[in-house]
Image (cartoon, grey):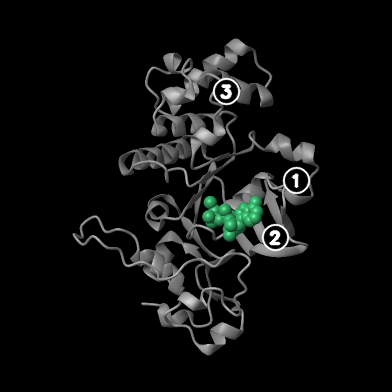
Amino acid sequence: MTEVALLEVRNLCIAVASGGALLPVVEDVSFAVEAGRTLGIVGESGCGKSLTSLAIMGLLEGSQVRITAGEIWFAGRELTRLPAAERRAIMGDQMAMIFQEPMTSLNPVYRIGDQIVEVLRQHRTMSRRAALARAAELLALVRIPAPEERLKSYPHQLSGGMRQRVMIAMAIACDPGLLIADEPTTALDVTVQAQILDLLADLQARTGMAVVLISHDLGVIAETCQTIAVMYRGRVVESASAAGLFAEARHPYTRGLMASIPDADADCETLPAIAGRVPRIDEQIGGCAFHPRCPYAASRCTLETPVTATYPEDHFVLCHFPDEAAP
Ligand SMILES: Nc1ncnc2c1ncn2[C@@H]1O[C@H](COP(=O)(O)OP(=O)(O)O)[C@@H](O)[C@H]1O
Ligand SMILES: [Mg+2]
């Protein structure tokens, strides 16, 4: 890989302050995404996906959760050391984020049009009239019918899928180089989910933006991403090209996630899931954090933290016995 990544996260660590102690929630996470490409981050709920994306956006400051080590490089600048004002200027302009539940990000008491105008005028010098015209264009771009009419709607007058489209319109308002979509379709039914993923791919093709798509569902990630990072309990346990991962997943957790993708053709009702759950951050687990749930766990896995094994074609695995799980 010779291309310089637009976003590169290097050895990121995040901890939560709890009763005088710092509990690690994200540990040594590294990944990169180039302009025009999509990186998928997948893992069950509680694995640290959202905290990682909030850290990239600079939205952790002032809370009990903070970055304790690592670097976040964006368009040639290291963000964790940037002054807050410069950081804010980048957020919403050069990088933007959409969340699972658009109702929490849309203000219920303002019309859609006014909210988009507000975003535009925060980052661009433009008249209200020009901003309203641009807002209508943006609604058309996210395929909302009768955009001029819709500018006057309040969030509660729209369906969940339409609200997510409005959020996407606000996110791309300033033509960001990077869009982080954190579970953008999780609250939506399957048909609308497919439409939103298709819309994101279409917008990416038009604008050339980089996308980080986060989901607990490997099925969602599989369709749109060129590279995939699998997270478990705050760590990237496997990363590879999408093709490489699907051809030869090596981490038992990744293989468990794959086995859990519903098969549209199968008529069985139950999904083979991974037994057990993601440990809480205050639960101490020695060795590999996945060992209590791993079918291949040996005594070494309970004692030693694995180090990353590297395979050709940028395929990385954090496992003591990666070849046990390989097909
Ligand atoms: N503000 C917070 N204070 C304390 N713990 C938190 C906070 N936010 C997240 N966590 C914990 O950090 C872990 C990772 O959370 P998160 O990044 O939201 O996971 P994901 O997005 O993968 O579901 C979880 O165990 C969660 O309970
Ligand atoms: Mg999350």
Instruction: Give the residue pinned by disc 3.
Output: 115
For numbered disc 2, what is the local secondary structure?
Answer: strand
Whether residue 295 sits left or right of residue 70 in the image: it is: left
Q: Residue 236, how many percent across, how many down?
A: 56, 65
Q: Residue 205, how many percent across, how many down?
A: 45, 39
Residue 227 appears in the figure: yes
Closest to the camera, between mark 1 and mark 3, is: 1
Instruction: Give the residue pinned by disc 2.
Output: 15
Nearer to us in this view, 56 or 216: 216
In the picture, the quarter occupied by the C terminus is: bottom left
Amino acid marked by disc 2: Ala
For numbered disc 1, what is the local secondary structure?
Answer: loop
Q: CA distance from mark 1 to mark 3?
A: 25 Å
Q: Residue furthest toward the top? A: 129
Sequence-first tag of 1 and 3: 1
**Residue drawn at point x = 72 percent, y = 56 percent:** 67
Question: Disc number at residue 62?
Answer: 1
Amino acid marked by disc 3: Gln
